[in-house]
């Protein structure tokens, strides 16, 4: 499937921004078109097909949704592991939330210690011991809970913010053309390519 055009639920027009979901474009749509077994992500250790990536992303998004995370809210992602970072980006976009590289104004923090969790803000911690049992959860524990209630995709307006990178806000409709890691990830997966991490 070599489709580099964004998949729309409702097409944009002269007076409307249309609705879409970037995670749907990258993963769900491919499964609908019979590509569940196609390799989506490739690491030095193993490969992940589209179905297994969607399973991980849906579970993570399910955890995030349990904290009432939704469209327009910012998720600060600080994860050095590129595979986990890819899952986090796609899960955030699945909920219509905004992928951010700083914690300012964040409604949630996903980190392995490279970003400092915020007081009173939910955080999923990878390889870091939670210090606040109310707001901080250990990654694998949280993910096991998320697998019982994976999140569906959320309709997102084409002119809604999707990324906040280096102080720049990128709208949903412009993500596929954006040179950031998140933009390249969504664009490549949506075009049926394998992303090497």
Image (tube, rainbow, N blue to C red):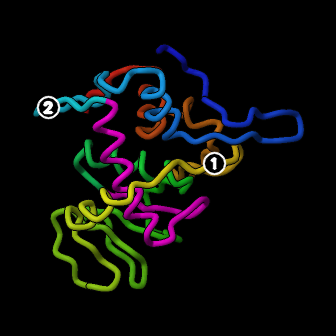
Q: Nearer the viewer, mark 2 or mark 1?
A: 1
Range covered by the magenta-colored residues: 50-78
Q: Residue most toward the left?
A: 45
Task: Tell me: 54 left or right of 11.
Answer: left
Residue located beneath label 1 in the image:
155
- Report x, y in % for residue 19: 69, 42
Task: Tell me: 136 left or right of 192.
Answer: left
| Residue beneath the point at 70% across and 47% down | 157
- Report x, y in % for residue 111: 29, 63
Local SS, label 2? loop
| Residue beneath the point at 75% across and 32% down | 11
Magenta span includes 66: yes
Depth check: 170 or 30 in front? 30
Q: Mark 2 or mark 1: name the one nearer the start of the chain.
A: 2
| Residue beneath the point at 30% across and 67% down | 124
Local SS, label 1? loop
Q: Residue most toward the top?
A: 2
Q: Badge 2 local density, few (<14 within 10 Å), some, or many (20+)?
A: few
Residue located beneath label 2 in the image:
46
Task: Tell me: 118 left or right of 174.
Answer: left
Q: Quadrant of residue 125?
A: bottom left
Q: In the drawing, what numbered circle is on residue 38?
A: none
| Residue beneath the point at 56% across and 29% down | 177
């Amino acid at each position: 499937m070599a489709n580099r055009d964004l998949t729309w639920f409702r097409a944009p027009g002269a007076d409307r921004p249309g609705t879409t979901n970037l995670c749907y474009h990258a993963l769900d749509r491919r499964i609908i078109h019979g590509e569940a077994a196609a390799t989506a992500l490739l690491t030095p250790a193993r490969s992940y097909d589209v179905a297994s990536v969607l399973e991980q992303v849906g579970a993570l998004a399910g955890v995030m949704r349990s904290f009432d995370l939704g469209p327009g809210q910012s998720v600060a992602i600080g994860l050095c592991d590129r595979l986990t970072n890819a899952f986090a980006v796609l899960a955030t976009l699945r909920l219509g939330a905004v992928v951010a590289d700083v914690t300012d104004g964040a409604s949630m923090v996903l980190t392995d210690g490279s970003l400092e969790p915020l007081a009173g803000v939910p955080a999923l911690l990878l390889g870091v011991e939670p210090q606040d049992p109310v707001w901080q959860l250990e990654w694998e524990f949280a993910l096991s809970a998320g697998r019982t209630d994976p999140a569906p995709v959320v309709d997102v307006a084409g002119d809604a913010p999707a990324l906040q990178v280096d102080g720049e806000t990128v709208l949903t409709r412009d993500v596929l053309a954006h040179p950031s890691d998140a933009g390249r990830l969504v664009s490549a997966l949506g075009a049926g390519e394998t992303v090497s991490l």
